[in-house]
Image (cartoon, rainbow, N blue to C red):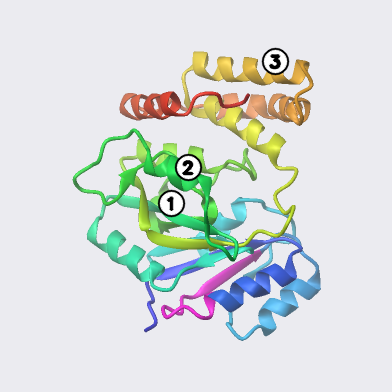
Amino acid sequence: MPDNRVTVAVITRDRCASLLRTLDALGTLPERPPVVVVDNGSDQATRQAVRHHGYGARVLSPGHNTGALGRNLAVLDADTPYVAFSDDDSWWAPGALSRAADLLDAHPRLALLAARTLVGPEGTEDPLNAVLAASPLPAEPDLPGRPVLGFLACACVVRREAFLAAGGFHPLLFFGGEETLLAYDLTARGWGVTYEPALTARHHPEPGGRRGRGPALRRNEVLTLWLRRPLPVAVAAAARLTAAAVTARPGARQALYETLTRLPAALAGRRRLPARVERAARLVDASAPGRLS
């Protein structure tokens, strides 16, 4: 039966066919959630196709590519206590949204639930599932699942109040690897961020659809450290990226250039994590060595 506790937020740019497939899939859910589509600068045909789709999704058109900040716009527009994120190539399994809402209802400190993600028609496990399941952070008695400091943005459900209080996705990062900073900021405010494999999201990326994101991921990993972590940690990451650029590792020079151009803004917005969150971040760092290699 319909569940009016969760809005699904979808960001899209120039992938009309994939977006319509996502709306078709969302239309099969028993929850029948309200859907907000943020059009990140697609052509008019995409907006018209969404408006004429039988689901009746609301369309927000900021008029340019807002990247991950489109999710912030959707959360502001939502009038439900919880918001589930999808991209134009992902959607939710039947019952997952109601289960997420039940967990958020029952755990008032819980801000974000990261779901188990299955990829493609075969339902292959996304590699991030195993990483999140193996989180070194200890269980917390007032939270379900496994505490984490990361998630997949197209497969999570957030408490609207907490998301907005934390500022949502950061404008400096724009898109690509933007999740860690939000997890830091939610946890720093005392909210819980957990992985709950009982929730399932489906991700059907188009072949080659994620190519070219490597530089942005590297850039945003380093910028996240400059924004929130101790200077030695940030400097070491910048040094590793510089070494990769000097040796002409693929995408490293572009990532370094984009990092340097954004570094003044990162320094201006720098805010150290509370000691307890920094300790948690160091545990996560120790469990996932070799980044930026």
Q: Which residue is mark 3?
A: 243
Which badge, 3 or 2, comes first in the chain's sequence?
2
Cα distance between the residues tagged 3 and 2: 28 Å
- Percent across and percent down for residue 34 are 49, 75
Report whether 215 appears left or right of 87: right
Which badge, 2 or 1, comes first in the chain's sequence?
1
Label 2 crowd (10 A; few <14 / some 14-19 / many >=20): many
Of badges 3 and 1, nearer the viewer stands 3
Of badges 2 and 1, nearer the viewer stands 2
The quadrant in which residue 248 appears is top right
Visible residue check, residue 80:
no
Name which residue type carries label 3: Ala
Q: Which residue is mark 2?
A: 182
Cα distance between the residues tagged 2 and 1: 8 Å
Cα distance between the residues tagged 3 and 1: 36 Å
Which quarter of the image is occupied by the N terminus?
Answer: bottom left
Please report the residue visible at 37 percent of the width from the left and 26 percent of the height from the top.
283
Prevailing secondary structure class for the magenta stretch in the rendered image: loop
Name which residue type carries label 2: Leu
Name which residue type carries label 1: Phe
Q: In the image, which residues are magenta?
A: 26-38
Q: Which residue is mark 1?
A: 163
Visible residue check, residue 164:
yes
- Percent across and percent down for residue 26 are 53, 75
- Can residue 227 be found in the magenta stretch? no
Q: Are marks 2 and 1 in contact (CB under 8 Å)?
A: yes
